[in-house]
Amino acid sequence: MNMAQDTADDEIDLGQLLGTLWRGRWQIGLVTLLGLAFGFLSIANTYPTYQSDALLQLEERSGALALPSSLSNMIENDPRSVTEIEILRSRMVLGRAIADQNLDWQVAPEVMPVFGTMFARYHFPFLDSVIPDRFVRPSDRVALNNLVVPPAMLNTNIEMLVTGPGTYQLTFPDESQLDGRVGEPLNVEQTGFSLTVAQLDAPAGRRFFIRQIDERRAINALRGRMSVSEVGRASGILEVRLTGMNRSETVRALSAIVQAYQAQNILRSAAEAESSLSFIREQLPQAEATMREAEAAVNAFRQEQVTVDLSLETQTILGQVTRVESELIDLQRREDEIAQRFTPAHPTYRQLLDERERLETRLADLRGQISELPETQRQILNLTREVELAQRIYTELLTRAQEVEVLRASTIGNVRVVDDASSSPNPVAPRRSLLLGLGMVLGMFAGIGLVLISNWMRKGVQDPAELEKLGLPVFATVNYSKEADTAGRRKGTLPILALTSQADLTVEALRSLRTSLHFGMLDAATPSLTVTSSHPYAGKSFLSVNLGAVMAQAGQRICVVDADLRRGQLRRFFGLPRNGPGLAEVLAGDISFQDAILQGPHENLFILPAGRYPPNPSELLMRAEMSQLIAYCAENFDLTIFDAPPVLAVTDPVILARITGASLFVARHDETPLGEVNAAQKNFAAAGLKFSGAVLNGFDPKKASGGYGYGYSYRYDYKQRV
């Protein structure tokens, strides 16, 4: 059975959870509105971020497409996208763009702390007189035409204070000052500082900060705002994006980056052609000299041998040798291509090898025929071959030099701008719908969490079932009454609700308590009741007085005794003086019972105040006079109610409970912790006592977190018809 009960306690009651959230709906709604307001505030207090983009295509160089394959092999084709992306992000490209657009110049206005961005973006005419003049307004503008600072002043702010229409004052880090005017150069020859302000639209008193950052920082800042990605896979299309708070500046900066990238690409292509042309020009003089030497050798041999020309047979052999050697060269080129695709065992490869073997055999036969020629014809043949070879090399170099000249003159690079840099009129950040939605959702969850945490941290008794679990029978649940709430009323007379508002729900609950006590005290030794609580402000005095009034209205003679000899305030319900005689004087023997007991506002209601606060209240309560008082009251009253101090504070309630007929514990709804109730029970148990019952006082259905409170809020009044 205990295991089943523990399991039930561990389960989450969804209905109770929803009821808790429903009761805290206004709190959740308020926090949600605060989250939404925070989202609006974040949007208003954040500068918009714009994004510019451009589209580039990586393609083959158009100049290379028109050249022969022999020359095209010297030019690199199909650059990898990853390589080009890194070049786009390199210091070479970004540094040139920064220099072109002066992106290392920074002009920052002075803004208010916390909400300065919002005041810099929007006009608040009713706050202009409150906001200091040095803080920026939406219409303020400053533009520079020239800025040169010495190396020692890089990354250092220079304060500029507007002094009038078109005039300003500069304050340097060394506290020196200079006055300037818009459009006029301001130079400091000693340091090399130079400044020209092109535009100054701000009233006197505005303050700006000018600085020039070093190239490395400027490059890193620009690189942080830039992103490059390939569109698709292996498409050769690059999308370049740049973000910034100034839309036009972002477009100009991205255009400068694209132009710098294009320029370096063209220069790189031209450099390749220039390198090839330089190599060819270096080889031309040597090739020409070799050709002249071969021609001179042939002429000299002919003059020496008096030989005019080759014989027909020798010319034929020379032509055949030249043709076979050319075929072997072409065959070697074909073999290099085939070797990348086939193995030597492949039929195509084997056919090529057979062809090469045939040509080599043919060349060997021709060389054998040359060796059989006469010595003179053989020598003239070799010399003539050298001349033809030298002429062919020289002619090919001349041809290639002309082709490279054409390529260099027509170099346009292999990058084409598909889309120029442009920016959308709408900012990409902050994303308003996302921030507002996020603020609303976070606010709602924060409100829910606040309600649940508040409910969890509320350790007070929520419904009578919690008291009954501790073994305390609940005689009544008394509703909260604003009229009877004595919190904050430190002076003056307190109302007796049972006499002023007899139809109130709270009074009806007291009548229910009267009935419960009638049956609960049937076996009591004396018709006396001790009313106590675990802490002050639980409402025990209110309960004692009003319970006595309700019972007096029923025709019973009731005496209410203020047994709190330390801080008793029961006299305030009856309008009695503070230092009048009472219980303390009765127990001390200074006054008789009959003289101390006073008539209340009802003929059946009597009051015995606390009297003057004695130094030893516990000892007074333990005197025999206390038992005599109870005996006297039992003979003259139907019920005597003792309003005792809190049981956890002093031992007085335990003393009274031992000599009275019953004891009643008062727990304040939502305020009295269950731990205090348990501690009060232990205090009584240590003296061999226990509470006869309990009352849940000040029950507020709006604060109730359990199912009992949720249903209890639907109680109705049953008033007499008029």
Image: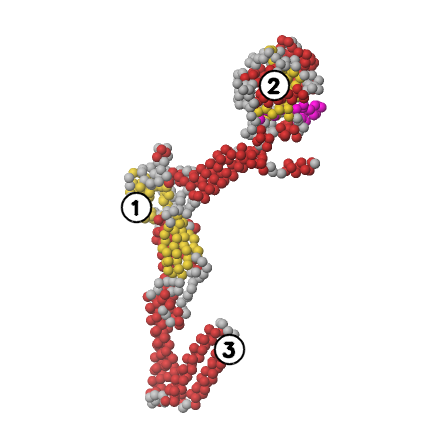
Q: Residue at x 32, y 46 (%)?
A: 144
**Residue 580: x, y in percent?**
58, 11
Q: Which residues are magenta?
A: 679-699
Vertical placement of residue 200 versus 412, above or below = above
Q: Mark 1 highlights which residue? A: 198
Q: Residue at x 48, y 74 (%)?
A: 338
Alpha carbon separation for disc pair 3 and 1: 78 Å
Disc number placed over residue 547 in the picture, else none: 2
Three-letter amino acid code at disc 2?
A: Leu
Q: Secondary structure at mark 1?
A: strand
Q: Mark 3 highlights which residue? A: 347
Q: Depth-wise, is mark 3 or mark 1 nearer the camera?
A: 3
Alpha carbon separation for disc pair 2 and 3: 119 Å
Three-letter amino acid code at disc 1?
A: Ala
Q: Quadrant of the N terminus?
A: top right
Q: Based on the displayed image, in which of its 4 quarters is residue 318 positioned?
A: bottom left
Instruction: Look at the numbered discs 2 and 3 and tell me whether their residues touch, using CB distance below 8 Å.
Output: no
Three-letter amino acid code at disc 3?
A: Pro
Tell me which numbered mark, 2 or 3, is placed earlier along the sequence.
3
Vertical placement of residue 166 versus 73, above or below = above
Q: Based on the displayed image, in which of its 4 quarters is residue 613 positioned?
A: top right
Q: Residues within 10 Å of mark 2 (few under 14, many from 20)?
A: many
Is 594 left or right of 489, judged from the image as shown?
right
Tell me which numbered mark, 3 or 1, is placed earlier along the sequence.
1
Q: From where the camera sits, is residue 433 visible?
A: yes
Q: Based on the displayed image, in which of its 4 quarters is residue 412 positioned?
A: bottom left
